[in-house]
Structure formats: structure tokens, C-alpha cells
Amino acid sequence: MNEIPNAQVEATQLDRLAAQRSLYSKAKQVQAWQLVLSVPCVIVWSFVVLAFPALRSYAALWGIVITLLDSVALDRWQKNLKERAATVQELFDCDVLGLTCPELKGQRPDAELIAEQSSRYRGTDPEYKAIRDWYAPAVGSLPIHLGRLVCQRSSCWWDAKLRRRYAVSVLIALGIFSTLIIVISLQQGTSLENLILTGITPLMPAITLAIKQFSEHNEAAARADRLKDYSEKLWREAVHGRLTVEEVTSQSRQLQDEIFDHRRRSPLIFDWIYQRLRDKHEELMNTGAEALVEEALSLRGRSTQAGGRFDI
């Protein structure tokens, strides 16, 4: 009853998905450099200073320099790549979900950018196997205004679930490394002054980054949950006929605006974590989508048997 399953596997749309994945991967590479400079390197400094206390001033200087570099240059570079990826994905969603495409915030992606980035992506996935069926094919059984809602709700559910798991992992990792440094320092009889200078100060970039990641991902998950709740409210009103098709479409467009803004603002999750969780979460996401499809079709069947009008 709608073209979402077919539209999302057209060459143009697959190229857009590939481009946004490539841009996100580049942004994650910048984030990886931030982590390497702020965590492993800092931890090495902590152990070095424990063995050679005379180097503690250099360790403190390293922490200051990396903190400034992170806020002045690396964060901005990452943000630019992330916004480009979000705008490419918005073009995909607007076409596939049958929504009008508003004036995008920031520069509209050039065709050359999409071609360049999709070509890079094909180096690792030449047949686009990992990005086919971005949305559950089952939504094709519904009219476009309902199938679109299922897709929007699935996007929000997936995002919230993944971010909460990532946030908890970051906090656990920080606790393990910090405890290890403090325990080793205390075992060597380090004074409070030396513990602060040689153990805690070099860890400040890592602590700052971990707390920032934890906070940002939790906030993003809460934002995604609110969008999911709104999509579910809109779904209930739509399937029970309390809204016209035009009203549902208009509110879906508003919801899409919020989803786009959420993507632009949200922090990144490394590809290896995404890949590790992808299959399990994708299966759950598709199950949720199929349950909504069954609900709508069941309501239509009961309405038809009762001789009523059910506008789906």
C-alpha cells in the first residue's frame, strides 16, 4: 500500500545512506583521536609519572594542551561532519517516507559530496548489504501515513536503546581505569599531593571526556524517548481515526523536523559498538514494527466486519 520498501533500495537512496554512513565514520575517526589522546595516552602518562615523578610537570602540561585542542579544534571538526551526515540522511528520509523536504539547516549536501562519500563506503560494502532494508519491509502493508509513523518510531526506539547501553559502558570503563590508577598510587605510599599531581591531574582529560560522553548520550536517549512517545501518541490517534490523513502527515513532518534536529545534536557511537549491537537490535526493531503493522491491519479487519469506515 506504500512504496517505502521499494523506495529505500533505489540506487539514489542507497547512495545517500552510504554517504551518511561514510561521513559519520569520518566524524567517529575524529572522535577516536580525541579518545586516544585523552585516554590511552593519559593513562600511559600516569604510569610513567608513577615511575618517574620528575616528569609530573610534563604530564600536567599534556593534560592542559589536549583539553584545549579538544575544545578548540577537534570538537568543531567532528560537529561539521556530523551535521553533513544528518542532512544527507534527512534527504533520504524525506524521499523514502514521502515527506516534503524543508530548507535544511546548514548547507544542503552537494551531489558530488554524496557521490564521493558513497564511493568510499563501497570500498567496505560494495553491494550495500549492511544498509539495505533500512526500515522494516513490513511497513509496506500500510498506507503511507501509517507506514511513515512506524518508521519514525523505529528510528527513535533504536537510537535511545543504543545510547543508553553506550553511556553505561563509558561510565564502567572510567571507573575501572580511575580505580586502577588510585590503587597503584596508594600501594606505593604516594602522598595526597603526589596522588593529585601524578595520578589524578593527568587523568582529567579522560575523566572530562567520559563524563561528557555519559551526560550527552543520556540526554540524547531521553530526547529520543520523548520523540518515540510522541510518535506512539500520534499512531494511536491515527489508527483509531481521530486524525485525518492530512493531519497525520502534517504532524509527521513536524516530528521529522525534531528527528533531524536530534541527529544533528546527538553525540556519536563508534562503528564497532554499533555493529556489535546491530543484529540483535535490528531484529527487535523489526519485531516492534511488525507488531504495529499487525495492530493496524487487525483494526481495519474489525472495522470492515462491522461495516464501518476505517480510513487506512
Image (cartoon, grey):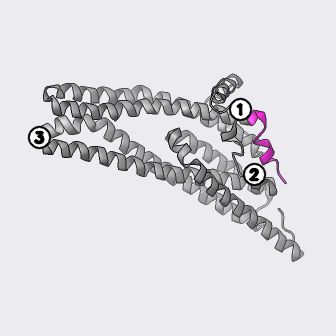
Q: Which residue is mark 2?
A: 137
The correct choice, above or below, for 188 with respect to 231 in the image is: above
Label 2 Cα crowd, 10 Å radius (few <14 / some 14-19 / many 20+): some
Amino acid at pointer 3: Thr
* First in residue order: circle 1 vs circle 3: 1
Q: Is residue 12 magenta?
A: yes
* First in residue order: circle 2 vs circle 3: 2
Q: Which mark is residue 190?
A: 3
The correct choice, above or below, for 274 with respect to 76 in the image is: below
Amino acid at pointer 2: Pro
Out of 303 and 301, give the one closest to the viewer: 301
Label 3 Cα crowd, 10 Å radius (few <14 / some 14-19 / many 20+): some
Q: Is residue 48 magenta?
A: no
Q: What residue sits 59% from the left and 55% below the top?
A: 157
- Residue at the limit of the structure toward the right, as seen here: 307
Quarter of image, res 109: top right
Please give the range of residues in magenta: 1-13
Q: In this orientation, does residue 105 appear? A: no
Label 1 Cα crowd, 10 Å radius (few <14 / some 14-19 / many 20+): many
- Mark 1 element type: helix
* First in residue order: circle 1 vs circle 2: 1
Q: Which residue is mark 1?
A: 15
